[in-house]
Amino acid sequence: MAQANPRILPGYRLSISFTLLYLSVLVIIPLGACVVTATQLTWDQFRAAVWTERARAAYALTFGASFIAACISAILGLLIAWVLVRYEFPGKRIFDALVDLPFALPTAVAGLVFSNLYVANGWLGRFLVPLGIEGAYSRLAVVLVLVFIGFPFVVRTLQPVLGALDAEAEEAAGLLGASRWQTFRRVTFPAILPGLLTGFALAFARGLGEYGSVVFVSGNMPFKTEIAAFLIVSRLEEGRPNSYREATAIATVLLAASFVMLVFINRLEALSRRSA
């Protein structure tokens, strides 16, 4: 008697049809409409919209702050994931649940909280501002909130990787005389590197598209603390004949950057599966 293919779910045709419909209506069509709207501009108009001095300053802050925040998130996420996987301590489940808080918390709430903490009369700002550390309405504020929303991606990416590591390899390295640092650098780190890079890329991509939290803490000052997402909103509010098209042109630039990051993430995930 022929056996059914276990890889085909019941209702396969219905499932694949629903999936393709979902991807088309909620993903492909809106993104395609954004690109089509941007292409209604001539090349000179498109370049003038996406490459003004103000736009370049917004790109520099968006990509620069996202990169710095992703680097910090990679370090913090590695440390937190290591502690949560390798150690047992009271309240571990509570701390593990807190990692997911930035996922559930509205980003606008995070922006309000950070701005209140770091202003001159805030709980932390009253001590930091006299030292010259401006944690609100500055570029530092943008990096802080991007770290807040980005480090959970690194933690959740690394936890299964660290949990699946073969402890015997680390024990063998120790028995052969390797120090803890040598064991981590030559045995553990190469095994978790693909996962760490994936978490970094996810945090970076998340930072590129962040708006809700940054808009409250950055001050949105053109050429100083204005991010690309806020520039898009500003273009929409100008009310000029080509304002909408210019906004979609800037959005297309961010879309292209996000697509490149998506390809990079998929390549890292494939590398991680091959090395597993």
Image (tube, rainbow, N blue to C red):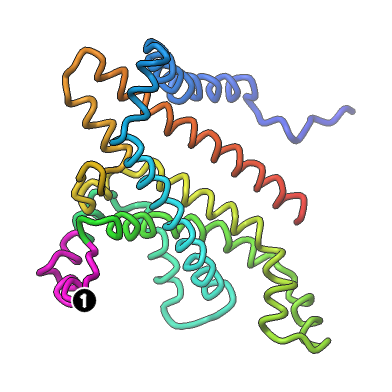
Q: Residues within 10 Å of mark 1 (few under 14, many from 20)?
A: few
Name the foreground residue: 151 vs 222. 222
Question: Does 121 lie within the magenta span?
Answer: yes
Dividing the picture into quarters, in which one does residue 165 lie?
bottom right
- Vertically, is 116 above or below 128? above
The quadrant holding residue 114 is bottom left
Q: Position of residue 79 (x, y in %)?
A: 52, 72
Instruction: Give the percent coordinates (x, y) of residue 49.
Output: 33, 24
Q: Work out whether 262 lies above or below 137.
A: above
Q: Nearer the viewer, residue 4 or 26?
A: 26
Question: In the rendering, at what x and y percent does residue 154 appear?
Answer: 51, 58
Q: The N terminus lies in which quarter of the figure?
A: top right
Q: Position of residue 194 (x, y in %)?
A: 66, 56
* Residue at the disc numbered 1: 131
What span is colored magenta in the figure? 115-135
Q: Residue at x 53, y 54 (%)?
A: 200
Q: Secondary structure at mark 1?
A: helix
**Residue at 75% of width from left, 56% of height from top?**
276
**Residue extending furthest left?**
121
- Residue 137 vertical position relative to residue 121 in the rendered view, above or below: above
